[in-house]
Amino acid sequence: MDKLTKEERDDIKRLIEVFEAFRALNPEMPLQYAVAFLHVAASEGLAMNELAERIRMSVASVSRIVAAYTKTGTNERTGWNMLTSHEDPRERRRKLQHLTGRGATFASRLAAEMRGA
């Protein structure tokens, strides 16, 4: 006897497709990287410390995660060019996170997967 409804199983299948989209970027991507990207996509303009609070990680860890999503990436590899950091015009020390065109396209694809489109 099935414990889940057909609708619930279909929802989970769509969620798997979202995870697979992230795995296509990096087959070993940690979940916190995906979560950080989704928070920026849902609330563009987040400061690094705000993002760190939302995902309950240190600012240093979040900074490394965001760096992986930028064009330049981290020391180990080129980034995915999906996020960009801009100075906050009101407080120059704060860096605000925004989607690039590629990041917006990826986020739109994820949203379509969740709608079952």
Image (cartoon, helix red, strand yellow):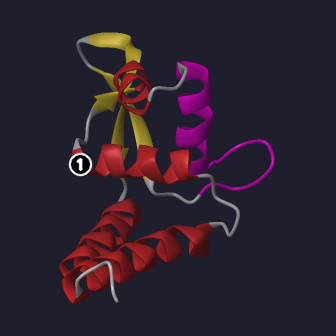
Q: Which residue is depicted at the point 31% across and 83% down?
A: 9
**Can residue 70 be seen at all in this image of the molecule?**
no
Residue 33 image offset from top left, x and y in percent? 54, 48
**In this orientation, which residue lies closer to the viewer: 46 or 9?**
9
Q: Is residue 53 left or right of residue 33?
A: left
Q: Which residue is depicted at the point 37% across and 56% down?
A: 100
Q: Is residue 77 left or right of residue 92?
A: right
Residue at the extreme right = 76
Residue at the extreme front = 1
Q: Which residue is under mark 1?
A: 42
Mark 1 Cα shell of 10 Å, populated few (<14), some (14-19), many (≥20)? few
In the structure shown, which secondary structural element does the residue marked by tag 1 occupy?
Answer: helix
Residue 17 image offset from top left, x and y in percent? 43, 80
Q: Which residue is depicted at the point 33% across and 86% down?
A: 2
**Can residue 77 be seen at all in this image of the molecule?**
yes
What is the three-letter code of the residue carrying label 1? Ala
Which residues make up the magenta segment?
A: 59-79
Q: Which residue is depicted at the point 65% across and 48% down?
A: 73
- Give above or below for 17 relative to 26: below
**In this orientation, which residue lies closer to the viewer: 52 or 91?**
52
Residue 84 placement: quadrant: top left
Q: Is residue 13 left or right of residue 68?
A: left
> Residue 10 colored magenta?
no
- Give above or below for 93 relative to 102: above
